[in-house]
Amino acid sequence: MNGYVEAGYAAVTAGLGSYAIWLSVKSRRLREAFVRVKVDDEAPKQGE
Amino acid sequence: MNRRRWVAVFGAFALTTVAITYVMGLWVTPPDVFQGNLVRLIYVHPAVAWVAYLAYGVTSLSSIAYLWKKTRNYKWDLLAASSTEVGVVFTALTLITGSIWGRPTWGVWWTWDARLTTTALLLVLYLGYLALRRVTEDREQRAKRGAVAALIAFIDVPIVHQSVVWWKTLHQSATVFNADLNPKIHGEMAWTLLLGFLSFTAVYLWMVIKRYEIAKAEMAAEEQGIEEAIRERVGSL
């Protein structure tokens, strides 16, 4: 087709794609961390 | 359907519309008489530039909502920061795709043209906004300074838009959304262009929702950390 056109579309895909992946990974990690904290808080403490 | 699922469905919708834009832009629409296949970049470049404007518009409105005492809430500050971060990604892509189009059309990757320079300045201003937010740990100070900086940075948005009218530039002036609202463009091209605007706007919305959720969770984690520190301190006394 045209190398410049392909480069333009590739740049948009790579830019938005990598940012979207970063957002998804970060939100999943935060969610897991919150679940862990919640489970730790609800677990019976030693001597209870 | 819960909120998380709705966001995932909306993300899939945004991705599908972008995929359709790509198929239309790369294979379905005809090449231009003068530009040939290079015209296909028009389906992404103006659309990502529009999203950058939109993102900074949302940042400004959220900043005003934070600064106004009646509506002051940290949610507005988080929304402003989230929208700016996404806007910075789109501004960088505007410059990159513009540069890729400029090389075969103008013969250079970059020139200090009014449109290009003011857009580069826009990127620097909002990167500065994001940097400023990292200067202080104090949440109120961060939100207030950020809101003021965002409003100052927004002054550049109309300058970027009007730069092709106010100065003699290499960059072409508005050809589709012109003053006469008379787009001289083939129907298939016009619809694909419109689809590009809609699809990248959907991507922006999904990204802002995700970034806002992350920012909210980080704020909650920060609060929890402070509470735990207080509990530990009080417990050790």
Image (cartoon, coloured by chain):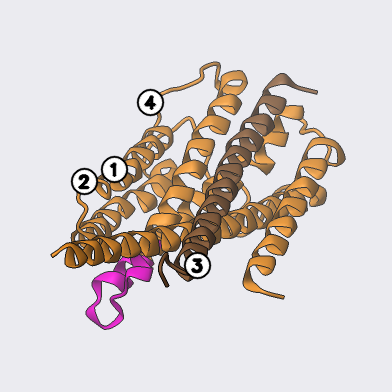
Q: Would you say residue B81 is visible in this rendering?
A: yes
Label pair 2/1, CB-CB below 8 angstroms: yes
Q: Nearer the viewer, residue B100 or B212?
A: B212
Q: Which residue is mark 3?
A: A43
Among the chains pictured, the one given brown colouring is: A
Residue under the point 67% across and 23% down: A4
Q: Amino acid at mark 2?
A: Val
Q: Which residue is mark 2?
A: B135
Question: Which dot marks residue B131?
Answer: 1
Name the chain under label 3: A
Q: On screen, B46 above or below A12? A: below
User: Which of the 4 image quarters holds residue B166?
Assistant: top left
Say whether disc 1 or disc 4 marks the residue closer to the N-terminus.
4
Single out the mark in the foreground, 1 or 4: 1
Q: Position of residue B29 (x, y in %)?
A: 83, 41
Q: Which chain is orange?
A: B
Q: Main secondary structure of the magenta part?
A: helix
Closer to the camera: disc 3 or disc 1? Answer: 3
**Position of the N terminus of chain B by quadrant:** bottom right
Query: Along the horizontal axis of the image, is A26 left or right of A17?
Result: left
Give the residue at x 32% y 69%.
B74
Q: CA distance from mark 2 to mark 3?
A: 38 Å
Q: B107 or B173: nearer the eye?
A: B107
Kind of residue at badge 1:
Ala
- Seen as rendered, the residue at the extreme left is B237
The magenta region covers B62-78
Label 1 SS: helix
CB contact under 8 Å: marks 3 and 1: no
Element type at marker 4?
Answer: loop
Give me the C-alpha separation between circle 1 and circle 4: 25 Å
